[in-house]
Image (cartoon, rainbow, N blue to C red):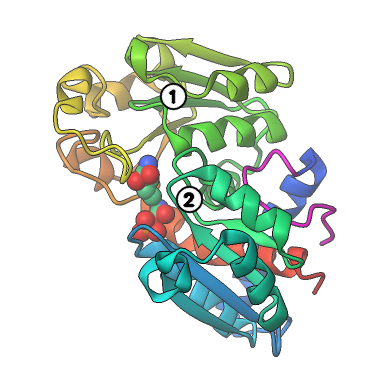
């Protein structure tokens, strides 16, 4: 699977064909792994992982993925590096490019990724920034494809905070031809420029009415109201009870609708236990699919 971009920072770097191709390659890698087939496509390759923020899934899935592909991953919290003592991003990017083959970074300010990308000669992957979470969306669309067999024309309802994951999901919808209806409080809408550019490619509706968004939806998605960069407890009042994904929301959706959440989840806040632990929830497949999609992505970026 070939892709043209050097880096994956938002998803907007991909063509529709590349996005769909990555998902199909991920499904193939997953099937192969289940049969015990595990090709060392990244033998002797090393991934540097930099984490400014905590992580369970991103760290473990990237590290395991590199291991399964015959490569190696180095994990650095930002305090482990000289970045914490003021070494520039530019010098860090140049140095890492001389030792390793790829950088994955989880950061606060998205422009740090732009700088890493500009000054490194190796691919840079966004492992979540305040603005985007592209790796999550590859896994989400893989999960949707597994369950629905198709992406084009599906209705995805996002309910809650129009945050970093929502921004990337909008790009995912645009690349796959899915429609999105996004229900958020007025002051919590997704990034305007992401919405605008994506509306040229597919149907992206913004509303403050979760029932309108959920009506006949094929996929219901939410995320925490308190992202790592946005933990003000007062935020909760703006969302509850109106923007909670509960049985009423699932009843309005299509009867075969699936529920997704990137995790970590706060049960009884953005989603009830009855939904996340219920039969329509595919959140564990979604979490697993981080592994397969990131393996496909690493292979594509490293031309393996
Ligand atoms: N969904 C996700 O990125 O999880 P982590 O924060 O645990 O990596
Ligand atoms: N929106 C959440 C996603 C965590 C994976 C955050 O940024 O904390």
Q: Is mark 2 within 8 Å of ligand 1?
A: yes
Residue 287: x percent and y percent?
A: 42, 58
Residue at x 49%, y 38% (from the top left corner): 131
Q: Circle 2 is placed at which residue position? A: 128
Mark 1 to mark 2 CA distance (whole Å): 30 Å
Q: Is residue 257 left or right of residue 153?
A: left
Say above or below: 35 vs 50. Answer: below
Residue 18: x percent and y percent?
A: 79, 48
Q: Circle 1 is placed at which residue position? A: 254
Q: Is residue 271 left or right of residue 82?
A: left
Q: Is residue 6 magenta?
A: yes
- Residue 214 shows up from this direction: yes
- Residue 281 shows up from this direction: no
- Please, what secondary structure does the residue beneath circle 1 have? loop
Based on the displayed image, in which of its 4 quarters is residue 187 positioned? top left
**Quadrant assignment for ligand 2:** top left
Residue at x 65%, y 60% (from the top left corner): 124
Q: How many residues crowd mark 2 within 10 Å: few (<14), some (14–19), many (20+)? A: many
The chief SS type of the magenta part is loop
Front in this rendered view, residue 55 or 39: 55
């Amino acid at each position: 699977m070939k892709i043209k971009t050097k880096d994956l920072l938002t998803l907007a770097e991909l063509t529709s064909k590349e996005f769909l191709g990555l998902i199909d390659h991920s499904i193939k890698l997953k099937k192969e792994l289940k049969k015990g087939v595990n090709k060392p496509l990244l033998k002797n390759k090393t991934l540097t992982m930099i984490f400014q923020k905590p992580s369970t899934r991103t760290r473990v899935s990237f590290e395991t993925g590199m291991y399964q592909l015959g490569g190696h991953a180095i994990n650095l919290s930002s305090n482990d590096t000289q970045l914490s003592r003021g070494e520039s991003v530019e010098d860090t990017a140049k140095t890492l490019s001389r030792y390793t083959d790829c950088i994955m970074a989880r950061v606060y300010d998205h422009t740090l990724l732009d700088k890493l990308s500009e000054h490194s000669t190796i691919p840079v992957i966004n492992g979540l920034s305040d603005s985007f979470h592209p790796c999550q969306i590859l896994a989400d669309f893989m999960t949707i494809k597994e369950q629905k067999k198709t992406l084009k024309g599906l209705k995805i309802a996002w309910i809650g905070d129009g945050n970093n994951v929502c921004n990337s999901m909008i790009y995912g919808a645009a690349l796959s031809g899915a429609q999105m209806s996004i229900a958020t409080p007025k002051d919590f809408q997704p990034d305007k420029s992401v919405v605008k550019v994506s509306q040229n490619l597919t149907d992206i509706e913004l509303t403050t009415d979760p029932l309108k968004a959920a009506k006949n939806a094929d996929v219901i998605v939410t995320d925490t109201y308190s992202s790592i960069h946005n933990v003000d407890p007062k935020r909760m009042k703006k969302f509850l009870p109106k923007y909670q994904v509960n049985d009423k929301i699932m009843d309005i959706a299509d009867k075969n609708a699936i529920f997704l959440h990137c995790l970590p989840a706060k049960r009884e806040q953005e989603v009830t236990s009855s939904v996340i632990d219920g039969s329509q929830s595919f959140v564990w497949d979604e979490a697993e699919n981080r592994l397969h999609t990131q393996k496909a992505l690493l292979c594509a970026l490293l031309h393996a």
